Amino acid sequence: MKYINKIFLLMTAAVSMAACSDFLEPNSKSEFVPKDAVSLNELLLGEAYLRNDKTGFNIFLGLLDDDIEATPYQDPAKNFEEDKFLASFAWQPKMFEMMEKANSGHINIYERYYELILGANAVLDYLPEITDTQDNINIVKAQAYALRGFYYFNLVNIFGAPYNSDSTALGVPLKLQSGIEASDDYLKRKTVAEVYAQILSDLHAAEDTYLQLPESQRWKANSYRTNLPMVQLMLSRTYLYMENWKKASAYADSVMKHPGLKLVDLNNVSTEGYDDNGKEIRNYLVYPTTKSSETIWSYGNVEDMFKWTYEGINSENSKGDTLHAYFQASKELKDLFDDFDLRKERYIVKTPQDSLRMMPFGKVVIGTTYYLPKHGEGVFGRSLRLSEAYLNYAEAEARLGGDGIAKAADVLTKLRERRCDVEFDYEVSITDADELIEFIKEERRRELCFEGHRWFDLRRWGMPEIKHIWHKSKTESLEYTLAEGDLMYTIPIPDEALEENPKLEQNELPGERTYQTITKQ
């Protein structure tokens, strides 16, 4: 246990990373030993949860998919480095090197996820050593497994190939202990299939442990802790990505039937509101909050999730009386919403300066200063929501065919009843399986936009071609193309991780991304 003891200084100090195993192992020297589940529960919160004060997990991922496009050309701010954005917006294979040279700060989401996994591992390693009631132990155990499964799911879908494309391709290393194993085999990348097997193992362990608890301890409304429906939703998502339609449907159904969750009716949600000082707040629908009736679990920092998609220039003065962001919601996404679909106005933030411009983020608390997301105390950037269960269920049932077609259409109608103006025809009556699946893909895009799903969905739906246009000047634009099945649908391992771990293999990468020049008269 001597290695496990070292982890507890992490409750008050950040992990410092300097050696090849530093991404995967503790290096603190505290000898504090926890005696009960309360201590471990605090460690979980401090070092294993993606709290709203932890950053470095999303950063550039929102620039990769087709729900975003560049805004028209604007005179750049002083010392503007366009490569900060083009590294990912143009899917460049040397994106981390480009971002570093553009003074983008420390960009290593690979490292950040392993820091949280380290905290979960320490808790799991120490559980057999403490004395407490079995229920208190199980509460901690369930959370630790749920978090580790969630983090590995994200890691393998960022740095590994899509499961349904090549499950034998390299995934990510599996570090399952907080100490140093006898073999350093854990430093090597496991296959995508092996990582998915571990994700399922962790999530099922979490589910089994939650089910051993009294019902009152499996779910608590307004809680930032993991819970049984969170685990079941992640199981549904994982099985959906693996194309195990029956299990994806079954777990989604369990979430939909949870008595503590209810879809928000957008017919009852205004598009305008006011803060305590009487200032107008636009688009104040808030899903990441724990107070929403369909929020299952909230996590992440608002600025971390959206900063690069709202970052712009102050062209008037230091207070930014005129703020022009570099990105906006894509026309393709906006055109998907029918006029009677209430989500377009309530899901996508508009700028106060230009009411026609829709920003590439939404569903978060919007501050009164321009259109910047508010990142105050207790505000999260992301959440797992009930509506995903409806969409997972619909897709799984539609792909199963037979009576699943009618089941899928019925669930979609129930979802759309809460999302569309009830004065119009929102019902889904499609009976052709292929047509219904295409409708589900569009509905998923409308419902889950800017919540971190689109890039992962594009990967598992065949990695289609995407084009991004960057406006270089008032007369010249650059068009970049991510080809169908492109190698850059799998993000390269950060350079820093490769340098520090010689056993870590890089993904196969294409050559430097080229562009087509579009000239305007």
Image (cartoon, grey):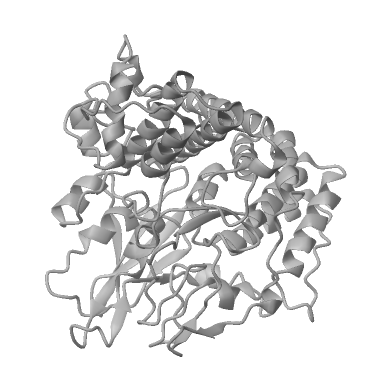
Q: Position of residue 116 (x, y in %)?
A: 37, 38
The vertical placement of 162 against 361, above or below, is above
Is residue 187 visible to the viewer in this orientation of the structure?
no
The residue positioned 46% from the left and 38% from the top of the image is: 41
Residue shown at 24%/77% (left/top)?
Answer: 313
Quarter that holds the C terminus: bottom left
Location of the N terminus (image quadrant): top left
Side (left or right) of 100 relative to 352: left
Find residue 425 and report its image quarter: bottom right
Residue 294 lies, with reference to residue 109, above or below; the image says below
Residue that appears at 40% across and 70% down: 373
Q: Nearer the viewer, residue 336 or 239?
A: 239
**Residue found at x 64% / y 46%:** 219
Residue 26, position as x, y percentages in the image? 27, 28
Looking at the picture, does residue 74 appear above or below residue 465?
A: below
User: Does residue 336 appear to the left or right of 513 in the view shown?
Assistant: right
415 with respect to 279 (left or right): right
Quadrant of the image occupied by residue 222? bottom right
Q: Which residue is nearer to you in this view: 432 or 205? A: 205
Nearer to the camera, 458 or 513: 458
Query: Does residue 71 appear anywhere in the picture?
Result: yes
